[in-house]
Image: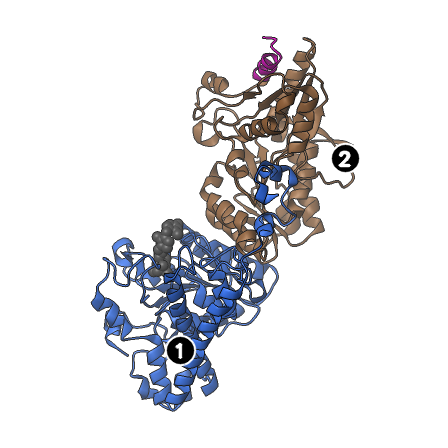
Amino acid sequence: MSAANADRSTATVSDAPAGDAPAGASSGDPDAFLGLSKEECVELLREMIIERRFEEKAAEVYQVGKIGGFCHLYIGQEAVSAGSISPLRDDDYVVTAYRDHAQAIARGMTPNAVMAELYGRADGCSKGFGGSMHMFDKTLNFMGGHGIVGSHLPLAVGVGYTIRYRGGDQVCLCFFGDSVVNIGAFHESMNMAARWKLPVIFLLENNRYGMGTDFRRVAAVKELKDRGRAYDGLTSLDVDGMDVLAVRQAVEEAIERGRNEKTPSFIEARCFRYMGHSMADPMHGTYRTREEVEKWRSDDPILSFTRQLMDAGRLTEEEYQAIDREAKEIAEESAAFADRSPFPDSDALYRYVYSDGYPDDMRRRDAWRKELR
Amino acid sequence: MAVLTYREALNDALREEMERDDSIFIIGEEVGEYDGAYKVTKGLLDQFGEWRVRDAPIAELGFAGLGVGAAMAGLRPIVEFMTWNFALLAIDEVVNAAAKMFQMSGGQYNVPIVFRGPGGAALQLAAQHSQSPEPWYSYVPGLKVIAPATAKDAKGLLKSAVRDNDPVVFIESEIMYNLVRDEVPEEEYLTPIGKAEVKREGSDVTVVCHSKMVHQALAAARVLEKEDIDVEVLDLRTVRPLDVGAIVASVKKTNRAVVAEEGWPMCNVGAQVVDDIQREAFDSLDAPVARVNGLDVPMPYAKNLEKLATPNADHVAAAVRHVCYAD
Ligand SMILES: Cc1ncc(C[n+]2csc(CCOP(=O)(O)OP(=O)(O)O)c2C)c(N)n1
Ligand SMILES: [Mg+2]
């Protein structure tokens, strides 16, 4: 696809599509598209474009103060969320970290609900209590949005435990970043998932940096996927995270292993975040060069998949333009929706501390605050 | 009624609840084949099998988080910490995950989980194995924190904790497992969470306490009876939510209070109790409230020093005399 590949080792998924071959080489051959129909391919592309335009809109409204707090954008990593969530069933589970807007949308949350959450409004998917880092939707088995690096991996293992406990055949897909391979929770989770054969797919999005730290500066292993080798029964592999079909195939295979053999997988998807770590961090920062960012940008997952589909006669320029227009409209509408949505009621303040209500005895301590009465 | 040890009462509670509801499982170190480091889970592996009684690796953060994830997915996990000292490795999952999930998700994911194990000092276990965790957890909105003093309460409260839909921190005691024994009803019963109980009625001073200190307070009350001081012993049983109503009602009756607990003094449960008393019963007080607690030092190993650092019945009695201006 591009120069960026030279900097990455080749995907090792044995029979993955030729992710590094020129996209045009597979023109017309349905196998090059994992047996997906034209419509399914276009839907994957559409998903990525919606995520991209949504995040661009979020960046824009953040600048004018509509969104508060931390806001971590996903731009550049769309192939990972679209490729991995699309093959899941409705009754599977997703658990993720704080860079979660696009994954929430990929799982089926409306951009309106995600944007309203970013705005801290009552119509947000977490009713304004979570914000950027804590997207939840129980009806979609989307279990958050977690802000403590690594700490949601054990949660995913617990979901895997529950699946086995009940004799189900679902899987739990768990996203996390490259900094996580160095934290204890990662190893504790891999160990338990492998030992008890739990259907968890650990999906590492190696975008090369944890904030400003190049993973090579802090990980005593060259290939992060090798961290999985210590665990018998855990399948570890890496994949080109800029190639939506490669991600999809790797995850489809992991899903099969999870459903049939109940075994966990560890997939390292090599990708890149185009924006700063959060809105507080400039695009290049002090820790990476403009050239590096540009090199990865030239391997844009959306552009390359678009080209691949066009070369194969599966997408026309007009269709692409129409999708992009629609995605921009969806993003605009989400911001308008969020703006219209009310702030959470102040009565809601104590509503979700305990499921059986906050005790009156303890509320009396605030009784002098007239506005809380 | 049968007389049971604190340990037997807990074991009965676990067995009865697991028989009643097959979404309950236990995970922790040595809970299965070893029958529990303190035998609280004795016999459960044989009865329920390994998916319901899971021996965990020594990975407190990992298996505590596993419990939280399983609770979010619909099970009712009981996570046993061999002792609460080791739970410090897992406090992130208890505080950042379990306690906050319900609110952070806008009320979608409640976390019905019990974290349990022994807290407090035993005998000469030195600094890392002798500490009271109640204040660390009762600080956190979203958690419920229980520390029962009797076998009867231990059973009734553990059953309630397992049925509760929010995360519960359940603090037992290594020393009490065997030493505490009392009458436990044969029939099914639940003890309500968040309700204190008067363990001894009295008219002169209220001693507010929980867990082991209830027994020290009762012993002190027996001594003080001979000095014509009539002590009311109020056992909090649950330290969060705190039964402020019961504390205030008792203090309004006796007009004097001593707050006794095993742990360190800074920001502990007693500090909060004193605050609630001064807010709601200020005009009823005939003396400043006194506090009895462990000394503000890491627990020393040497027997004589450990004894000095640990609160006992004599300390409670002295504090009661002090608030009665009888010392
Ligand atoms: C335990 C913990 N330590 C530090 C932080 C602060 N922090 C937030 S994100 C981050 C970097 C994480 O990088 P990575 O896992 O690679 O994910 P990415 O941001 O690249 O998606 C750090 C250090 C945190 N949230 N949690
Ligand atoms: Mg990263």
Residue highlighted by disc 2: B185
Seen at 28% across and 63% down, the residue is A283
- Residue B136 coordinates in the image, percent (x, y): 50, 37
Whether residue B56 is visible here, answered yes or no, is: no
- Given residues A281 and B138, the one toward you in this image is A281
Q: Chain of mark 2?
A: B
Shown in brown, the chain is B
Q: Quadrant of residue A50?
A: bottom left
Q: Amino acid at mark 1?
A: Leu
Real-space Cα distance between discs 2 and 1? 64 Å
B310 part of magenta stretch: no
Q: Badge 2, how many Cα within 10 Å: few under 14, some, many 20+?
A: some
Seen at 37% across and 77% down, the residue is A16
Residue highlighted by disc 1: A245
* Numbered badge on residue A60: none
- Residue A346 coordinates in the image, percent (x, y): 57, 51
B321 part of magenta stretch: yes
Q: Quadrant of ligand 1?
A: bottom left
What predominant SS class does the magenta segment belong to? helix
| Residues beneath discs 2 and 1 located on the same chain | no
For discs 2 and 1, the disc positioned in front in the rendered view: 1
- Residue A341 coordinates in the image, percent (x, y): 54, 64
Shown in blue, the chain is A
Query: Image check: A356 left or right of B303?
Result: right
Query: Image check: A373 left or right of A287?
Result: right
Residues shaded magenta: B314-327
